[in-house]
Image (cartoon, rainbow, N blue to C red):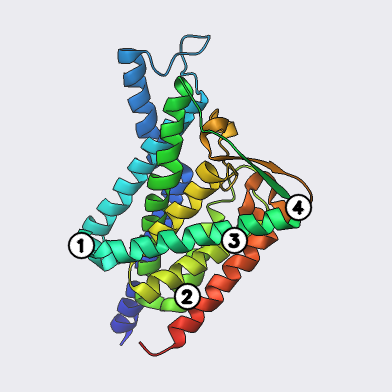
Amino acid sequence: MILKLRSAVSERLWPVMRALALQALSWSGWVGYLPALAIFAITSYAFGWPVLGPDDEHLLITPDVRAWLMVIAQLSRLAIFVLAWRLIEHKTLREMSLEHFRSLWRPLLLGVLVGASGISLVVLAMIASGCLQLTWAIPSISGHASLGGVGFLLATSFLGPLTEEIESRGYLFQNVFRGWGTKVATIVTAIVFAARHLQNPEASALGIINIALISIGLTLGMLQLRSLWYAIGWHIAWNFSLSFIFGLANSGHSLKSFGIAGASVFSSNLSGQTWLSGGGFGPEGSVLTTIVITLQIAFLARLMRRPS
């Protein structure tokens, strides 16, 4: 009896502990940035990029270097989580709700549509409230800014969403769900997903709450469609639209901070109260995002209560 109890507790706790340990390792930055620094040391010696600082001993971390630092770090994190899923959990990617190529398009495109629609509603509400002005701009960047722009695009709009979704709704959610069920897994994933944004620039209490709500909405959409590709598509559309369409900060990361302010379709100008505009954190720190995401959650929750 005691052995059975220990076995049951072990089966419920250890998958969660493994997932949280991987999250902590990823959050620390070491798993991502050590490979990046090693690669930069080689490219600096071989090609002269990145350049050395005034002391000729340390790499000069310019905005374009920061962008590619993010790219390499995300590739490293992605590799770690996929390898852990295969070698430690002994599971296939399909068991992470990642279908093969032929089956991914419907949930992926639906996620892109819902994500783009959601952020567009938020932006329209911000314009109507008077806290946002958008001006049509012709995207234009050159030189090292172009290199930084490509890196920032990959890091925030493609690799970032893919990596974050596999880390959270892929690995963490599935491991918690295995022993504790859907509700607990959804809540734990939302808390961890939001907490990982605490270190972002200009993070606010409302912004972190909204990130948790976004996580819940993405999890419900994934469960409804039985596909992680929905969450990945939503995340890609949301991030890309924020930065490269509307020229707004994405969870505290702005084009301007990476030296590529001219890379968006519109230039933006925020005014008024931070709780309405989101301030430096971007629209994710706005109460208007709270309303839009809550409506999405309510719709998905109602949809899930219906018979299949």
Residue at which label 3 appears: 121
| Upstream in sequence: badge 2 or badge 4 | 4
Amino acid under disc 4: Gly
Residue at which label 1 appears: 102
| Upstream in sequence: badge 3 or badge 2 | 3
Badge 2 element? helix
Answer few, some or many: residues within 10 Å of disc 2's Cα (few below 14, many 20 plus, some between 14 and 19). some
| Upstream in sequence: badge 2 or badge 1 | 1
Q: Looking at the image, which residue is at 51% across and 71% down?
A: 187
Residue situated in front as seen by the camera: 209 or 129? 129
Disc 3/disc 1 C-alpha distance (Å): 31 Å
Answer few, some or many: residues within 10 Å of disc 4's Cα (few below 14, many 20 plus, some between 14 and 19). some
Residue at which label 2 appears: 184
Disc 3/disc 2 C-alpha distance (Å): 30 Å
Contact flag, marks 2 and 1 (Cβ < 8 Å): no
| Upstream in sequence: badge 3 or badge 1 | 1
| Upstream in sequence: badge 1 or badge 4 | 1
Q: Looking at the image, which residue is at 64% across and 57% down?
A: 124
Give how far across and how far down residue 307 sits, in percent.
39, 90
Amino acid under disc 1: Arg
Residue situated in front as seen by the camera: 241 or 199? 241
